[in-house]
Image: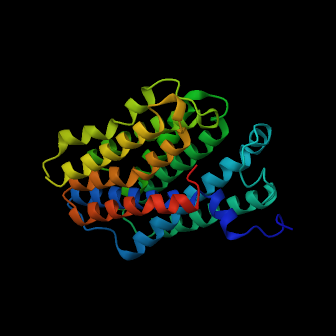
Amino acid sequence: MSQASPDLKTWMTLGRVSNLPTVWTNTLAAALLASSAGALAPPSSAVWILLLVALSMLYLAGMLLNDLLDADWDQRHHNPRPITLGLVSRQQVGLACALLLGLAAVAVVGLSRLIDQPYWLLGSTLLLLACILGYNLLHKKYVHSVWLMGACRSALYLTAATSLAVPPAPIWLCAMLLGVYISGLTYLARQEHRNQLLNRLPLVLMLSPMTLAIHNDNPWFWPVLLLWLGWLGWHYWRHLANPRQRQVRAFIGAGLAALPLFDALVLAVADQPLGSLSCVLVFFLLPHFQRWIKPT
């Protein structure tokens, strides 16, 4: 019976919806940075809505596809995800994934009709889709496929920026730094089921956002940076530093929760204080969402 009618929480767990606000803060930061760097007006309400719908649907489709393609591996390793627990069937997940991709396509087509340079938008969206598919197909086979996961977030930044214009130079830098951060976090996630920390290189990669300090002249940047470093440092000490008390999964959740602080740093550099403050507020809310829906 449970497979015939999965409940809402099952679908939310499949979609890792506790991480969905990080997609929204990424979108906000990239679009406002493009606006600031190009001296352009921010996106209109219609553009914001379609952009958020498109990127949210692509994120959710990617999460569902991940569980669908990993179902056999999860079964062998007793990984308690909804498909292996029998809470939803593979067919249902496949249909939902196709529906989400269809909704994303409709939103992107609608968005392309509202902007001046749609080819950049379509190109970056196809790049994002290719990274999502590539990661989900390869991540169990090749350890360095984690860079494709990082590329997913980089492409998301570029796609949000193309809703205004050709991505300016600061967007490329921020997209790259975000991709490196996510790749480091994903290296750690590969050892989540074994609760191991094989080396600390992933943690070094996660420090990539500190590069933004070179380009900063806004005093708001520094308290946000200290908050970000304090959050990750505390969780490192609590969950990774002591091998006998290691909780890799908990640290990964903390690393995902810190994503809005990256966006807050970007918007501080772009002199967008209200947008930066909004991202900080999302950061404070995310741990509460993660207690309800697991982030990994």
Q: Is residue 263 left or right of residue 212?
A: right
The picture places residue 296, in percent across and down from the top left corner, at: 58, 49
Quadrant location of residue 260? bottom left
Q: How is the image coloured?
A: rainbow
Q: Report the residue at 34% width, 36% height from top.
A: 207
Q: Report the residue at 52% width, 58% height from top.
A: 290
The picture places residue 70, in percent across and down from the top left corner, at: 72, 43
Q: Nearer the viewer, residue 39 or 228?
A: 228
Quadrant location of residue 13? bottom right
Q: Which residue lies furthest to the top in this view?
A: 199
The picture places residue 109, in percent across and down from the top left corner, at: 53, 65
Q: Residue furthest bottom?
A: 45
The picture places residue 237, in percent across and down from the top left corner, at: 40, 37
User: Is residue 68 positioned above or below 115 on the image?
Assistant: above
Q: Is residue 290 left or right of residue 80?
A: left
Q: How many labels does the image show?
A: 0
User: Is residue 143 positioned above or below 78 on the image?
Assistant: above
User: Is residue 140 positioned above or below 108 on the image?
Assistant: above
